[in-house]
Image: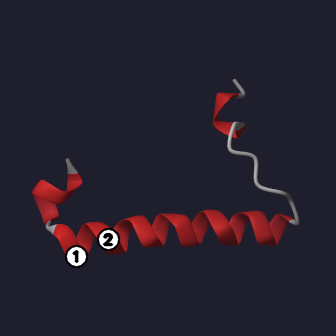
Amino acid sequence: MLNGRIGYHKTLVAIANKHARQLWAVLAKGESYNPQAWQRG
């Protein structure tokens, strides 16, 4: 688990960074969010 390796606060920052990058990608492309997109193969 990431939290055990790098600590609680760094884990929070890493997750927030991931979510911010995902949100930016959706907004930059003008697409709507699709929570099942990862299932497309």
Mark 2 packing: few (<14 Cα in 10 Å), some, or many (20+)?
A: few
User: At which x and y percent is residue 23?
Assistant: 66, 68
How has the structure been colored for display?
secondary structure
Q: Amino acid at mark 1?
A: His
The residue drawn where x is 34% and y is 75% is 13
The residue drawn where x is 12% and y is 57% is 5
Q: Secondary structure at mark 1?
A: helix
Place residue 29 in its image quadrant: bottom right
Q: Amino acid at mark 2?
A: Leu
Left or right: 26 in relation to 11: right
CB atoms at circles 2 and 1 under 8 Å apart?
yes
Left or right: 12 in relation to 29: left
Marks 2/1: CA–CA distance = 5 Å
Q: Secondary structure at mark 2?
A: helix
User: At which x and y percent is residue 24?
Assistant: 68, 72
Disc 1: which residue = 9
Left or right: 23 in relation to 20: right
Place residue 41 in its image quadrant: top right
